[in-house]
Amino acid sequence: MFGPQVPSVTPSQVEPQAFLLDVREPDEWQAGHAPDAHHMPMMEVPARVAEIPNDTQVVVVCRSGGRSGQVVSYLMGNGWDNVRNLDGGMQAWAAAGHDVVSENGQPARVL
């Protein structure tokens, strides 16, 4: 394997009050994201880590789960024990029928 497994949840296991942290790039975010997600590109996480809550479930999401898994590992290594990777990322989120919205006026889609 490629290192330790990170805790994950499926789209149906995401709690309604969870803080959904989308770590994709701006073009991916603009094309389509979960309506209540918070955008923080992966490379900005170390500089903006104070914006990530540690008192509620945080679900980290990217396109398919790779980048978000790295962010979960990083956060766990820095004291967060409330973080989970969204298994399958935005692709699984959309496939499960969850809402996806765009920021660019186009029909929402997952890049």
Image (spheres, rainbow, N blue to C red):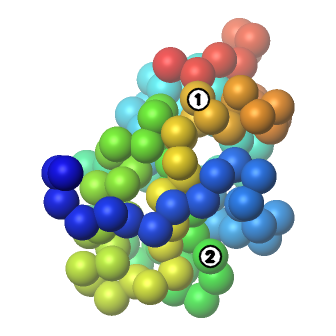
Q: Which of marks 2 and 1 is nearer the N terminus?
A: 2
Q: In this rendering, would 89 be left or right of 36?
A: left
In the rendered image, the residue lying farthest to the top is 106
Residues 20 and 64: in front is 64
**Residue hosting label 1:** 91
**Residue 36, horizontal then vertical, whole percent:** 74, 51
**Residue 13, horizontal then vertical, whole percent:** 73, 60
Residues 99 and 36: in front is 99
Establish if 31 lies above or below 92: above
Q: In this rendering, would 7 be left or right of 20?
A: left
* Residue at the image position 75 percent from the left and 12 percent from the top: 107
Instruction: For marks 2 and 1, give the CA distance.
Output: 21 Å
* Amino acid at pointer 1: Gln
Q: Residues within 10 Å of mark 1 (few under 14, many from 20)?
A: some
**Residue 106, horizontal then vertical, whole percent:** 71, 10
Establish if 33 lies above or below 8: above
Q: What element carries label 1?
A: helix
Establish if 60 lies above or below 95: below
Q: Is mark 2 on a helix, strand or loop?
A: loop
* Residue at the image position 77 percent from the left and 52 percent from the top: 12
Q: Does the rendering let one see residue 41?
A: no
Q: Residue 57 carries which label?
A: 2
**Residue 30, horizontal then vertical, whole percent:** 57, 26
Q: In this rendering, would 54 be left or right of 76?
A: right
Q: Residue 31 carries which label?
A: none
* Residue at the image position 53 percent from the left and 48 percent from the top: 87
Residues 48 and 83: in front is 83
* Amino acid at pointer 2: Gln
Q: Residues within 10 Å of mark 2 (few under 14, many from 20)?
A: some
Q: In which quarter of the image is residue 57?
A: bottom right
Q: Does the rendering let one see residue 53?
A: yes
In the rendered image, the residue lying farthest to the front is 1
